[in-house]
Amino acid sequence: MFGAKIGIEYNLQFFGSNHTVISTDFPFAPRAEPTQAVSSFDLDRKDLEIICYGNAERLLCTAFNWAR
């Protein structure tokens, strides 16, 4: 979705936060766009954590201790 707010918003509405993972293509593309887009939504802390790293932890079967 290239960090586009409309794409992320549609994905959240269609799939929900439990099926959304936010990532970047850093160092090949700017990393601020997806972060800024997610921050602009009215999400509670739990959904934000799920989207930003919780789903990735679940998919990769690992824990990102630095994220907490």
Image (cartoon, rainbow, N blue to C red):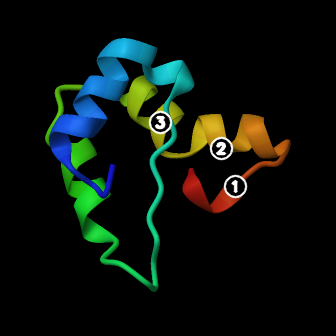
Amino acid at dot 1: Phe
- How many C-alpha atoms fall within 10 Å of the one at disc 3: few (<14), some, or many (≥20)? many
Res. 44 visible in picture: no
Image location of residue 55, percent across then percent down: 62, 35
Tell me the distance, in whole angstroms, between the alpha carbons under discs 1 and 2. Answer: 9 Å
Mark 3 sits on what residue? 51
Q: Which residue is drawn at 33% across and 49% down?
A: 1
The type of residue carrying mark 2 is Ala
User: In this rendering, is residue 11 above or below 16?
Assistant: below
Q: Residue under circle 1? A: 64
> What residue sits 20% from the left and 55% below the top?
36
Asked if the residues shown at circle 1 and circle 2 are in contact, with their CB atoms under 8 angstroms apart, the answer is yes
Badge 2 is on which residue?
Answer: 56
Q: Residue at x 26, y 25 (%)?
A: 10
Which mark is first along the chain, 3 or 2? Answer: 3
Residue type at mark 3: give it.
Ile
Q: How far apart are marks 2 and 3 (CA)?
A: 8 Å
Please say whether residue 4 is visible from this viewpoint.
yes
